[in-house]
């Protein structure tokens, strides 16, 4: 937008002209990411307050409100399955979900009685399965959980889905455990108080609730890599081997576990221009969001397009094509 301005225009008039070109986006040189269809209101379904979904959603909402004046509601939920059902019911515009739950939603399997129309905006970061125990626990593997008090995650959460599948792959029936169905915040509090022996959690690194727990008491993570191949055989290639690095949560060595991608998804009614604006905002504000939610720094254009089993929403797809190097 570098133009030669006639000498009759004073520098004051030029400044006024440039100010008039700023469409509320904060940078006068950028085009409108919403393409003239900026929404007045959006609802984002996240997860428990001590998890990364919730923090990510809150920070994204803050950017949408501060930069564009979009009133954004952040829903605290049970997690992936809950979020996908909220999309299906029209109670949320966008949501975070683990890819395995998206697979069930698309197929009408598991917790879903019929297929759910889901479109992807971006693969955002990967979840890592955690099995957390006190450092002095006798638990060394999944079989040692028999007879113990174990949280398998909140009902209809991604953690609950993965925990059930992990136990099945390890041939450890949930009926052999003393099961609690608690979200991450409640699970951490119960493990801290001694009313639980172990906690399953599926989330990004570092999950705030577990970071806080590790600062208050020594903990260990039980390796789960031994079930990854069986999970892939039964449920497909959405699961992969992952590693929680030494030093995370104070662990003294790398812990091999399983990982699953997280996807930012939308229902079929989201306008293409709104999807385009949301994706551009997530990338434009990546560093700002990552200051509070480090997992946001993992958002990369080269990986964000791999959202199987959900197809990319047309507006999101257009964004990736426009920004392709």
Image (cartoon, grey):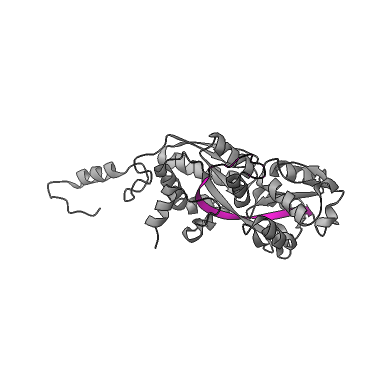
Q: Nearer the viewer, residue 53 or 273?
A: 273
- Identify the residue at the far bottom of this view: 253
Rendered view: 91 above or below 133: above
Residue 301 visible, this orientation: yes
Q: Which residues are magenta?
A: 109-133
Across and down, in percent, residue 235 comes to: 66, 55
Would you say 219 lies left or right of 60 here? right
The dominant secondary structure in magenta is: strand
Across and down, in percent, residue 14 comes to: 21, 46
Rendered view: 268 above or below 2: above
Residue 137 visible, this orientation: no
Would you say 227 lies left or right of 239 here? right
Across and down, in percent, residue 6 comes to: 13, 50
Residue at 46% x, 50% y is 285
**Residue 75 lies in the magenta stretch:** no
Across and down, in percent, residue 314 comes to: 42, 48
**Residue 129 lies in the magenta stretch:** yes
For the image, the number of numbered tags is 0
Q: Nearer the viewer, residue 302 or 134?
A: 302
- Place residue 251 in its image quadrant: bottom right
Quarter of the image with the C terminus in it: bottom left
- Place residue 294 in its image quadrant: bottom right
Would you say 171 lies left or right of 62 here? right
- Place residue 84 in its image quadrant: top right
Q: Nearer the viewer, residue 75 or 288?
A: 75
């Amino acid at each position: 937008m570098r133009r030669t301005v006639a000498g009759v225009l004073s520098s004051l008039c030029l400044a006024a002209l440039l100010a008039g070109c700023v469409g509320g986006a904060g940078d006068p040189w950028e085009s409108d990411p919403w393409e003239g269809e900026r929404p007045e209101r959006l609802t984002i379904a996240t997860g428990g307050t001590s998890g990364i979904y919730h923090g990510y959603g809150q920070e994204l909402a803050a950017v949408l409100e501060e930069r564009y004046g979009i009133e954004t509601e952040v829903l605290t939920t049970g997690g992936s399955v809950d979020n996908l059902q909220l999309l299906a019911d029209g109670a949320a515009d966008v949501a975070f979900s683990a890819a395995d739950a998206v697979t069930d939603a698309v197929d009408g399997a598991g917790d879903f009685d019929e297929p759910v129309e889901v479109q992807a905006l971006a693969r955002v970061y990967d979840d890592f399965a955690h099995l957390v125990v006190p450092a002095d626990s006798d638990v060394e593997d999944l079989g040692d959980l028999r007879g113990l008090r174990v949280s398998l995650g909140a009902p209809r959460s991604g953690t609950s889905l993965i925990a059930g599948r992990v136990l099945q792959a390890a041939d450890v029936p949930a009926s052999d455990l003393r099961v609690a169905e608690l979200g991450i915040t409640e699970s951490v509090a119960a493990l801290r108080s001694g009313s639980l022996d172990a906690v399953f959690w599926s989330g990004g690194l570092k999950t705030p609730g577990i970071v806080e727990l590790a600062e208050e008491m020594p903990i260990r993570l039980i390796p789960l890599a031994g079930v990854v191949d069986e999970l892939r055989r039964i449920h497909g290639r959405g699961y992969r081997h992952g590693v929680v690095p030494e030093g995370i949560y104070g662990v003294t060595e790398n812990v091999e576990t399983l990982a699953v991608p997280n996807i930012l998804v939308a229902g079929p009614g989201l306008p293409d221009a709104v999807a385009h604006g949301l994706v551009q905002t997530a990338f434009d504000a990546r560093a700002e969001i990552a200051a509070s939610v480090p997992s946001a720094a993992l958002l990369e254009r080269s990986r964000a397009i791999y959202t199987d089993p959900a197809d990319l929403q047309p507006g999101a797809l257009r964004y990736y094509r426009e920004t392709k190097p």
